[in-house]
Amino acid sequence: MRAAVVSTFGQVPEYAEVPDPSPTGSTVTGRVLAASLKNLDRGLVAGTHYASAALTLPFVPGIDGVVELDDGRRVYSPAVAPHGMMAERTVVDPAGMVPLPDGIDPVLAAALPNAGLSAWYSLEYAGQVQPGHNVLVLGATGVTGALAAQLAHGRFGAGRLVVAGRNRERLQMLHETSGAHVLHLDGGDLTEQVAALHADTPFDAVIDYLWGAPAEQTLTALSSAHGSGDFHRTRYVEVGAMAGATITLPAAVLRSAGIEVVGVGIGSVPGDLQARANTEILPALFAMAAAGDLDLAVSTWPMRDVAAAWTAPVPSGTRAVLVN
């Protein structure tokens, strides 16, 4: 068969012939329908991710994907080492695969899990979002941010949803589908806008994919919006750092308001929640996508064009997906 092959860390994969995969133990084989190209995949191939050290060259990249098993069933599955998903065929472990509902596009099903799980963990566990809660999503036009906004509205029942980002088209989509209040990030200061919104109806959770200056401004706004003695707990969830890896914040900001800062990432999500991914969370995400209740922008590339897909610029809020 043919597959994307990484022979040297830091180089773009090439499409080449490799041996057909052979199942062992309980694993089974199938045809890869779609595999998304994520930052995690890029980091592993670049050799910059901590898990790169466990990879043996040459290897086929692709940590997960959608596979049509030899018996005709279509499933989502993580890759089973040493077989990656950016190939014509692969090996999957039945214990780790999730059946796909009828009607879901394999491309969407491949693009959804990584971002969808992160967004879900941010809302349920870190943000503790409940029906009626008021939620602000910073960086809502990115892939994961847009899903977090849609899930906050459509799954977690947010009362008021405020979305901030630069891509006006994606912000408009979120406004139309969820009634979200829009904040355009054009380089200006968010402090006054967030403070006014928080003073009017306090935020229960902020899901932040930006950090940097927007985080400084938002945290300051949460602190300054209420007078002395007014208390409202706001869970501030740090997920990404697209606007900067560090912030400068006066200590008094955290002492003068009910702000709780938590993070979501590798090592910060408890095992019992991760254990629900295949049995509960992913099936729910796939069902929502199949029903048309989640909007996720994708760009598709033939698997044979993996080198071009790897180096092509990806529009904001769009996930690249390789297909056979």
Image (cartoon, rainbow, N blue to C red):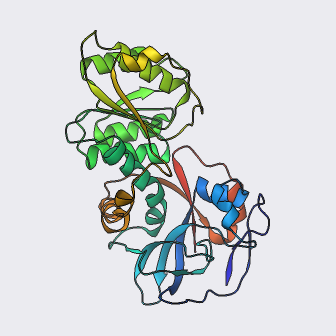
Spot occupied by residue 18 in the image (x, y as percentages of width and height): 72, 82
Spot occupied by residue 190 in the image (x, y as percentages of width and height): 45, 19
Residue at 51% in and 84% down:
30
* In this rendering, position of residue 230 left or right of residue 21: left
Among the 4 quarters of the image, the one containing residue 97: bottom left
Residue 263, above or below 108? above
Residue at 47% in and 57% down:
114
Residue 296 in view of the camera: no
* In this rendering, position of residue 198 left or right of residue 138: left
Residue 200, above or below 158? above
Q: Identify the image quadrant of the C terminus.
A: bottom right
Residue at 57% in and 37% down:
242
Residue 90, above or below 173? below
**Which of 143 and 245 lies nearest the eye of the viewer?**
245
Spot occupied by residue 138 in the image (x, y as percentages of width and height): 44, 33
Spot occupied by residue 100 in the image (x, y as percentages of width and height): 37, 72
**Which of 4 and 130 lies nearest the eye of the viewer?**
130
What is the count of numbered marks? 0
Among the 4 quarters of the image, the one containing residue 201: top left
Q: Identify the image quadrant of the N terminus.
A: bottom right
**Which of 271 and 321 lies nearest the eye of the viewer?**
271
Q: Residue furthest left?
A: 132
**Which of 235 and 146 lies nearest the eye of the viewer?**
235
Residue 239 in view of the camera: yes
Residue 71, above or below 186? below
Q: Residue furthest top?
A: 228
